[in-house]
Amino acid sequence: MSGKLKCVTVVCVLAGLLIVLSGTARGNWFETFDNNKFDLPTWKFLIYPDLTKTFTAQIKDDPNGSDYLALTETSSVKIGGSAFGAGFGSEEAFTDVRIGVVVNVLGDASHNYYGIAGRTNYFIDDGSATGAPGFIATQTYVMHVNWEYGPANLRIDVEKIINMQNIMRNEESLGLDIAVPGLAHARSYYAELDILGSDPTYITGSLYEFKGGPLVAKTATMVDTKGNDPWEEEGAGDAPFLKGISGIFGQNEKEQPAGYYVTFDEVFSVSDGPAAVNSSPADGAKDVPIDATLSWIEAAFATGRDVWLGKPGAMEKVASPAGKTYTPGNLELGQTYQWRIDQIGSAGAVAGRTWTFTTADYLIVDNFESYADDAGLRTAWLDNISDPGVEYVFLAADGNKTMRLEFQNQYEPYFTEATRTFVSPQNWTAQSVETISLSFVGEHQNAEHLMYMRLEDTSGRSFKVEHPLTYACQSDSWRQWTIALGLFADGGVDLTSVKKITIGVGDGTASGQAEGDRDHIYIDQIVLNPAGTQ
């Protein structure tokens, strides 16, 4: 359960010592410590190293009536005091699990870590494996509530531990180790560790003002796969942990100050608790299409789900889909939405975390990101040149995907077009859009070519709008061309039933290009814009 320090070294793990945990993969246990006694008779307290015998696990009286558990080590690791002291309420093994506990952050810098552990497997070393007797966690996921440098520097993190060693890298840069906002941390908090899934496994740590109260801080979700993950050290046990027991622990691996003193209250481990994860759109996503499909990953206990969605402060239950996706239909442009998934199980509904996303303030006609290769693009965008085996439309990928339109307008018909025919007619009067725009870039070596856009409706009525500058295609920088949709409507196109869009270059007369020469432009982000945008 090592944090930043790695002073406990396990030379080997003796297979014969490994405890094979029994029990079901579904279950719950709770502990309040009320009335100065354990609710569970199955509590087990284990330490490493177990030398000085100065570790204690004791229920303390609270003058307010809520008794709590204190894990105390009074000896320094320098003289053999325990670096870790753990408590497990039950030997019951969990797969998907939520472990919650009230922690009390005290107002001094005593180098303490509070810890929550899930999917833990362990053995008791007699000293032959590590050189000292005691408890060895062979596999576990943990959450630290770390006040190693006092309450002014409170942090939370999630880690993967093998043989008491933290095998993490890049924790902070990936959001798996974060500072808790604010300064007034010498108080109680409610901490929560969620673990769900097999491959991948999803691990999330959260800190709340109190159980059921406002969220204070949350780590990114650690995704553990069978491969070597970005946060995981090379060759350090890549496989996810699938099952194990749940517990709490205190930790101090430093020589001074001596030992640790950590207090816990209202500890529980439940299989019907982990919140849905891996939301799509991702939490905080911008420029989400208004017709986006929402999706998520659920815990194993869920037999149903309720989708809550709405503007900030106005979420409401909108659906109870049969699967793990939901398409709300057209949302508003440029609007922030909140949503969550409440999973339904045998114990009722378990409220999920609230996510947010913001829709794009435009409608995408084509941004070319959906095409895999030239062939896929040419299926959608057809050129007008009939030469067999000669292509003029290409997919370009330099970061964003774009359409490269090449042209040889020194030859008949002296213009080159790429046309997309929509599978279903498009209504371009919805969402109060007023303009259509596209981004383009050419190069100064191009000849001058007239650039234009043409729309055609399902009745075959079409209208062409020309760019006012014939040298626009010579721009070496990306430019935006915005056209009022009213121009097409005035030209007779039914904007409620648009069937085709064409991007063309050339005016029907020879361009003056040299024999065999090809000019080109790139096209990207063809979008519809509401009133007031450029």
Image (spheres, rainbow, N blue to C red):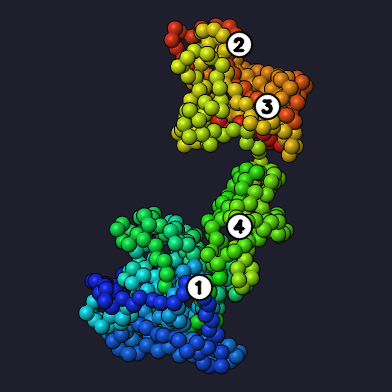
Which residue bears the numbered disc 3?
A: 499
Q: Nearer the viewer, mark 4 or mark 3?
A: 3
Q: Are marks 4 and 2 in contact (CB under 8 Å)?
A: no
Q: Position of residue 309 (x, y in %)?
A: 68, 56
The residue that mark 1 highlights is 26
> In this rendering, does residue 440 appear at all?
no
In the drawing, what numbered circle is on residue 64?
none
- The type of residue carrying mark 2 is Asp
Kindly indicate whether the residue at mark 3 contacts the one at mark 1 (C-beta within 8 angstroms): no
Callout 4: SS: strand
- What's the residue at 66%, 28% (across, down)? 482
* Residue type at tag 3: Lys
**Secondary element at tag 1:** loop
Reading the image, the residue beneath label 4 is 355
Between residue 285 and residue 366, name the one nearer to us. 366
Disc 3 is placed on an element classified as strand
Locate residue 419 relative to residue 153 in the image: left or right.
right
Which residue sits at x=47%, y=72%? 25
Residue 465 at what x, y percent from top left? 68, 19
Q: Residue at x 56, y 55 (%)?
A: 296
Q: Label 2: which residue?
A: 507
Disc 4 or 3, which lies upstream in sequence? 4
Foreground label between 1 and 2: 1
Q: CA distance from mark 4 to mark 1?
A: 27 Å
Q: Residues within 10 Å of mark 3 (few under 14, many from 20)?
A: many
Q: Is residue 311 left or right of residue 325?
A: right
Dot 4 amino acid type: Trp
In space, the residues marked 4 and 3 are separated at their CA atoms by 37 Å
Callout 3–callout 2 Cβ contact below 8 Å: no
User: Mark 1, mark 3: which one is toward the viewer?
Assistant: 1
